Image (cartoon, helix red, strand yellow):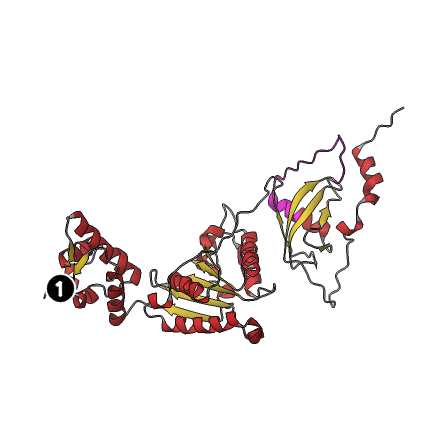
Amino acid sequence: MIATYFKSDFLKNNNIKIDPKSTKTKQKVNKVDKTIYTKFVEIQPIGYPFDFNLMEDDLEINDIVLFEEYAREQWLGLTVKEGAFLFDQKIIPDYGFKILTAKPNDSVISENTIIKLVEKKIKTKKQVKSVKTNIKFDDIVGHENAKNKSKILMKYIEDPEKFGQWAPKNILFYGLPGTGKTMLAKAIANELEVPLYLIKATSLIGDHVGDGAKIHELFEKATKNSPSLIFIDEIDAIALHRSFQSLRGDVSEIVNALLTEMDGIFENKAVITIGATNNLNSLDYAVRSRFEEELEFKLPTDEERLAILESHLRTYPLESNLNLKELVKITKDMSGRDIKEKILKTALHHAIIKDKNIVDMQDVEYAMKQSKIVKSEVKGMYE
């Protein structure tokens, strides 16, 4: 008679054959020991270690949050290493999950461990790519404090070991939009000849919650290609003060991931993080306190606006007959970006539309109207 095997019996008879190197027995957490606990682990469902016609390798998860609680509870105290495996021993005994990422590696799962499940069908992640630029320090007008800080960064990149615990790590750029925060970050990366990973914080927010895995992936990529520079623009989108919780939604996962990376829990040697915000006072204090220095980007002075105008006009595709002294007055309280985009570019396009070969102050007057600048605010424009 042919014996009939059921799934539970088969699993019990074969559990002892699982490679002991791929799983760990539970350990009691000793409060006084030096156990390294897992902050984040990413796993991928693989299937069963053997083939049996009553078993299906496909796994359907109805609730990711509940799965994380379920997984954390049963794997509490287990040691995780990248490339090793975890096996379910409850509802779907001996179903295997491969450990793709463990932060830190060779650490123990705790009650605070974040467990991220990657679908089996996903074979590759969306790659984090560095940004190349040809912007130089000479292209940046003003912002001397930020430029001086970049000199420290340059010294650090040249010899990271020399700085040790005094290494520059986290810097915050703040100021009105268009004042050159992103532009300077690009210039620093170009001058230092290091990869620049430029990301907008809003891209880290999912439909419901922030994705901490994206932060870990970003820093992992930057570390592998260090020395490197990470620039997180609009950081207030994910790090708003807790009093604005209703506005930002539940992004605690990504904030915790960011704090973990900025604290240097993982060794991100020669990786410099620059955050940028237009709303300094709206930042969560926990995030803001991680920045060693806050550099303000102010609106350009009269002398700086003149330098900005002269720099842009050197690349003008048409000749210009403009009163720079009056242009400096007109552009008061405007950012460098607004001077270029709202005044000079609009005036140039108006001249081209009119089939003119020279851009003059009448084209500038048109640009002023389009930019909602009241003429009475600028006296003696044509004097």
Quadrant placement of the N terminus: top right
In this rendering, is residue 164 above or below 343? below
Q: Is residue 263 left or right of residue 94?
A: left
Near-viewer residue (228 or 30): 228
Residue 107 sits in quarter = bottom right
Q: Is residue 58 left or right of residue 199?
A: right
Q: Residue furthest top?
A: 1
Q: Is residue 363 left or right of residue 128?
A: left
- Residue 60 part of the magenta-drawn span: yes
Quadrant placement of the C terminus: bottom left
Residue 306 point in image, percent of width and height: 24, 68
Please state which amino acid type lies under the numbered disc 1.
Answer: Met
At horizontal 61% and vertical 42% (from top left) the residue drawn is: 119
The answer to whether any part of residue 173 appears in the image is yes
Residue 228 point in image, percent of width and height: 51, 63
Q: Secondary structure at mark 1?
A: loop
Near-viewer residue (38 or 44): 44
Q: Is residue 317 left or right of residue 30?
A: left
Q: Residue furthest left?
A: 383
Please name the residue that numbered disc 1 is placed on: 381
- Prevailing secondary structure of the magenta residues: loop
Near-viewer residue (305 or 373): 305
Residue 69 point in image, percent of width and height: 65, 49
Q: Give the total of numbered labels.
A: 1
The answer to whether any part of residue 333 appears in the image is no
Residue density around tag 1, few if under 14, some if 14–19, many if 20 or more, within 10 Å: some
In this rendering, is residue 199 above or below 302? above
**Magenta stretch, residue numbers:** 49-69
